[in-house]
Amino acid sequence: MIPTTRQDARCPECVLVVACIPAFNEERTIAKVVMKARRHANVVLVCDDGSSDMTGEIAENLGAVVLKHEGNSGYGSALRTLFTEARRHNPDIVVTLDADDQHDPDEIPRLVEPIAKGETDIVIGSRFLGRSNAPNYRRFGVGMITRISNMSTKLDVTDAQSGFRAYSGRALESAIPTEMDMGASVEILEKASRAGLRVKEVPVYIRYDVAKPSSQNPLTHGIGVVMSVIKLMAIRHPLMFFGLPGAISFGTGMVFLLWTLDIFARTREIVTNIALAAIGATTVGLILLTAGIMLYVVVTVVREVK
């Protein structure tokens, strides 16, 4: 049943829910997803991310508000468009789910409930807590990305790549991503951690027998997400990310330099390999230290301005 009134003290279970669905060439499944999502959301938003088929037209004819991109901009870009539009509706809860029928919209209440009760700010539907026929390579890839993400965010989640999520209105203010592609999922968790938001997981069932072949190679996809995580770690902890390796490299260079000078003092000869190692390690160390300090200053200034 669709909740029809905004949450208040008299009716804590009544919330204004907006469903956000990124979609790219999903005309086979978009009708089913939109129709089922409308059972549990007051507003259904679909971002047609440059589809060449009838995805947008079908969604619009079934009552969804369709936001169109001229070209395929990526998952993160679609989320950004959806979240920006969702804020105009002043929602209590925003739910994101995929358009390919991997996520079951009838599980939306399971994600909404903890936020409606005030227990958390973000709910992640985890495929690893529920039933899933995920291929082994995907389990391994998502597991690795999740472990790297947890190191960066200090969160303890099992599925950092799940697109089936719910956000409170408060969390939505911090959740709008800047990453254009799949790295947005991890970026949102990074922002949530920095904002001190509460994150909870619930088990969901994600289907893989309905998914169309991906247009992106799984290896390329995984590398892209990992690179996004590394970038976020570098921005959040620049002194540790650049400064620590820089200090180690600089220290190593100093050791090789002293070794070179010691040999020269005793033999009046310069061992080329050792001298080059000293120059190389010292140079790299200075570059990393400088980069870490400069990025730390820039990030600090930006945060203070915000």
Image (cartoon, helix red, strand yellow):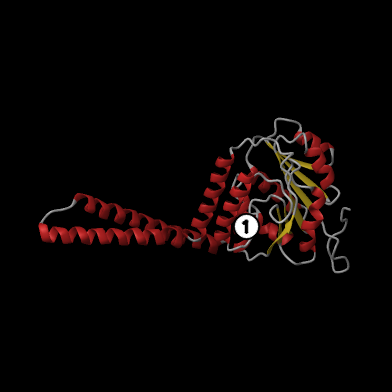
Q: Is residue 206 above or below residue 288?
A: above
| Location of residue 261 in the rendering, given as x and y in whole percent from the top left corner | 17, 60
Relative horizontal placement of residue 218, taking residue 40 as reference (left or right): left
Q: Residue at x 22, y 62 (%)?
A: 258
Write the residue at 12% across / 54% down: 269
Along the line of sight, the residue nearer the viewer: 144 or 4: 144
**In the rendered structure, which amino acid carries the disc numbered 1?**
Leu
Q: Is residue 171 above or below residue 98?
A: below
* Displayed quadrant of residue 209: top right
Residue 12 in the figure: left or right of residue 289? right
Crowd rating for badge 1 (residues with CA inside 10 Å; few <14, some 14–19, many 20+): many
Q: Nearer the viewer, residue 175 or 229?
A: 229
Task: Give coordinates of residue 187: x percent, y percent.
Answer: 60, 54
Q: Is residue 104 visible?
A: yes
Visible residue check, residue 91? no
Q: Quadrant of the C terminus?
A: bottom right
Total count of labels: 1
Look at 63% across and 41% down and name the residue there.
Answer: 74
Callout 1 secondary element: helix
Mark 1 highlights which residue? 189
Question: Where is residue 197 shown, x and y percent of the image?
Answer: 66, 64
The front one of 173 and 179 is 179
Residue 10 appears at what percent x and percent y? 88, 68
